Image (tube, rainbow, N blue to C red):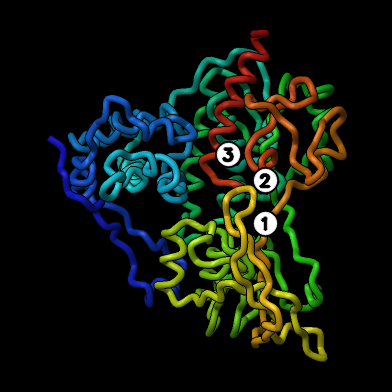
Amino acid sequence: MADMSPKKHAMPSQEPRVRNKNFDEVALGYTAEIAKAEAARCLNCKNPLCVSGCPVNIDIPGFISRVAEGDFEGAYSVISASSSLPAVCGRVCPQESQCEGKCVRGIRHESVAIGRLERFVADYHNANSTEKPQKPTLNGHKVAIVGSGPSGLTCAGDLAKLGYSVTVFEALHVPGGVLVYGIPEFRLPKSIVAKEIDGLRELGVEIATNTVIGRTVSIDELMDEEGFEAVFIGSGAGLPRFMNIPGENLKGVYSANEYLTRVNLMKAYREDSDTPIMKSKSVTVVGGGNVAMDAARSALRLGADEVSIVYRRSLDELPARKEEVEHALEEGIKFRILTNPIEILGDEKGFVRGMKCIEMELGEPDERGRRRPVEKPDSEFAFDCDTVIMSIGTSPNPLIKQTTSGLDTEKWGGIIADENGRTSRKGVFAGGDAVTGAATVILAMGAGKTAAKAIDNYIKGI
């Protein structure tokens, strides 16, 4: 008999006024007792809609039933059959719009805390299991993966399990892609990412860092000279966009990508870090997505007295996860909603001194159903700040397109691929943000999983 408690068990967390001064993980994780109690809320539906809401189709009722029984390693076996990165997904997936969004319990009350349970199971396994994954027998075929983010790592793991010799090529000096340079420690500790990647290495996956595909070696060379029979491009979307307003070249203006890379990958928050980053007093972040929340919350932890987010729609339209917005508000981030920047103001030395904005109001719905922001006449105003972080989206780097023959791309830079990840170049597959533009970790993983199956079929001639 399921526990019919209307609310999910709360996640133990650091207090807001403590955590906004450190980079330790905010959420502390369920205990075994809490996990079993939360698992008991699952109805174990005969037609589990939660599974269809998961981009990698984890057997969610299957793993939750094992948690309820106290069989945590059994639960991990169920999850890992579908997901290569469970400890990551349990932390950063937007479960509220995917698996938990389809949970039957959520129709009248709160859904089962699927993400929190996944995190618990993965953390339990990582803390207690000493068993190493068994290397599959090699099948004699080689596949190259471009990028070590979530889509690339998932594709690599699935292919390695099928016996392929897989090499992942990463441009940076540390593997993990956006998981290490984009998501802060307080949401996703890098030790967790390293542990997941170590598991892939134990399966036989090789990772070559400091390798820029298109400069160090091209995809053409990998296939024509290095003997790789297929290539998966999972290089993400790391090219930042700007608004092209006056003042964006002032000192003190960052892209969110640069700012977060300095903080997350280069550890600018540490006293012994050699990475330069401004010691800001007043920071303004432009944008409303998860990356904007990450940048704003990082700036606060770096010692800023005031951090505000400028967003041209209302709080209801914010694209960031509800949990991230709530955490930002709890930590003291200010939201300047229905506001759009029109100029970044500078001083006589070329440093940021403020921002000029215009008030907005919501008009008619756009093609996605969201009401369009419209400028209010005669509503310009200015405020002081010394740092501006632009977080209005990213696009794929054009380098791969420029150096790969026969690869078709969209006008905005995304690689054109079909539902199985096949591109216009024979033997070349693509998925994740390199195809869709910036999206979620789990969607990128789903694309990597789909492409792995298609690559296996391609090499087998199916």
Residue found 49% across the figure and 60% down from its top? 185
Q: Amino acid at mark 2?
A: Gly
Of all residues, the one furthest to the left in this rendering is 1
Residue found 44% across the figure and 23% down from its top? 134
**Nearer the N terminus, badge 2 or badge 3?**
2
**Nearer the N terminus, badge 1 or badge 3?**
1
- Identify the disc placed on residue 444: 3
Q: Amino acid at mark 3?
A: Ala
Disc 2, disc 3: CB below 8 Å?
no
Mark 1 to mark 2: distance in Å?
Answer: 9 Å
For label 1, the residue is: 393
Mark nearest the camera among 1 and 3 is 1
Q: Amino acid at mark 1?
A: Gly
Q: Which one is nearer the viewer's eye here, 369 or 222?
A: 369
Mark 2 to mark 3: distance in Å?
Answer: 10 Å
For label 2, the residue is: 437
In the figure, residue 36 lies in which quadrant? Answer: top left
Q: Label 2: few (<14), some or many (≥20) within 10 Å? A: many
In the figure, residue 398 lies in which quadrant? Answer: top right
Residue found 62% across the figure and 14% down from its top? 457
In the figure, residue 441 lies in which quadrant? Answer: top right
Q: Position of residue 387 (x, y in %)?
A: 66, 78
Can you say which quadrant of the picture contains the C terminus? top right
Q: Which one is nearer the viewer's eye here, 458 or 343?
A: 343
Q: Secondary structure at mark 2?
A: loop
Q: Secondary structure at mark 1?
A: loop
Residue found 33% across the figure and 39% down from its top? 103
**Nearer the N terminus, badge 1 or badge 2?**
1
Q: Label 1: few (<14), some or many (≥20) within 10 Å? A: many
Q: Is residue 109 visible from the viewing direction of this image?
A: yes
Mark 1 to mark 3: distance in Å?
Answer: 16 Å
